[in-house]
């Protein structure tokens, strides 16, 4: 009986230890066998956009990101800093697809930042019904 109580105590202690660890950030991975990441955008009770990756989006050159969500939303880049020719992408039938340029680290606009940090950070946002959510996006060099 003591062994059973001891075993249950250790099990409960372990459960509480793991459950109380803080979440550092949500990671996203490409769909198995592809170079595509899918991010789902839902809307909370107040109508605010909630992407499935809420804290940090880490990407690699050449990856494609498919944002899916409400019928109408847009993905935009702040401060005119974008890896693309335009700063805003409007959904078509509830989907926005963007692809990170394969040679982004050779782009003169980002040379200093990529040389210093081995990554490039963009402030992008999701806009739905006039409301915005704006987590950072980081492009890291291939390992």
Image: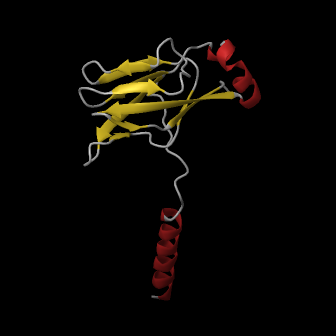
Residue 83 in which image quadrant: top right
Count up the numbered dots: 0
Which residue is nearer to you in this view: 15 or 61? Answer: 61
| Colour convention of the picture | secondary structure
Please name the residue shown 31% across and 27% down the image: 73
Which residue is nearer to you in this view: 52 or 5? Answer: 52
Which quadrant: the C terminus?
Answer: top right
Taking the image as shown, residue 115 lies to the left or right of residue 26, namely: right
Q: Is residue 90 above or below residue 3?
A: above
Please name the residue shown 29% across and 31% down the image: 69
Q: Residue 112: horizontal and vertical position, in percent? A: 74, 22
Residue 96 in which image quadrant: top left
Q: In this view, does 129 lie above or below 84?
A: below
Which residue extends farthest bottom?
Answer: 2
Which quadrant: the N terminus?
Answer: bottom left
Q: Residue 65: horizontal and vertical position, in percent? A: 44, 24
Q: Residue 16: horizontal and vertical position, in percent? A: 48, 70
Q: Residue 102: horizontal and vertical position, in percent? A: 58, 14
Q: Is residue 25 above or below residue 51?
A: below
Please name the residue shown 49% across and 88% down the image: 2
């Amino acid at each position: 009986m003591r062994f059973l109580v001891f075993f249950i105590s250790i099990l409960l202690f372990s459960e509480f230890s793991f459950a109380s660890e803080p979440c550092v950030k949500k990671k996203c991975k490409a769909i198995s066998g592809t170079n595509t990441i899918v991010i789902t955008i839902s809307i909370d009770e107040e109508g605010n956009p909630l992407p499935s990756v809420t804290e940090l989006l880490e990407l690699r050159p050449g990856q494609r990101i498919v944002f899916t969500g409400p019928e109408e939303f847009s993905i935009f880049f702040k401060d005119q800093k974008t890896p693309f020719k335009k700063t805003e992408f409007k959904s078509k039938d509830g989907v926005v697809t963007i692809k990170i340029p394969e040679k982004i680290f050779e782009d003169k606009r980002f040379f200093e930042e990529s040389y210093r940090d081995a990554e490039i950070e963009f402030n992008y946002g999701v806009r739905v019904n006039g409301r915005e959510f704006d987590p950072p996006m980081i492009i890291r060099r291939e390992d």
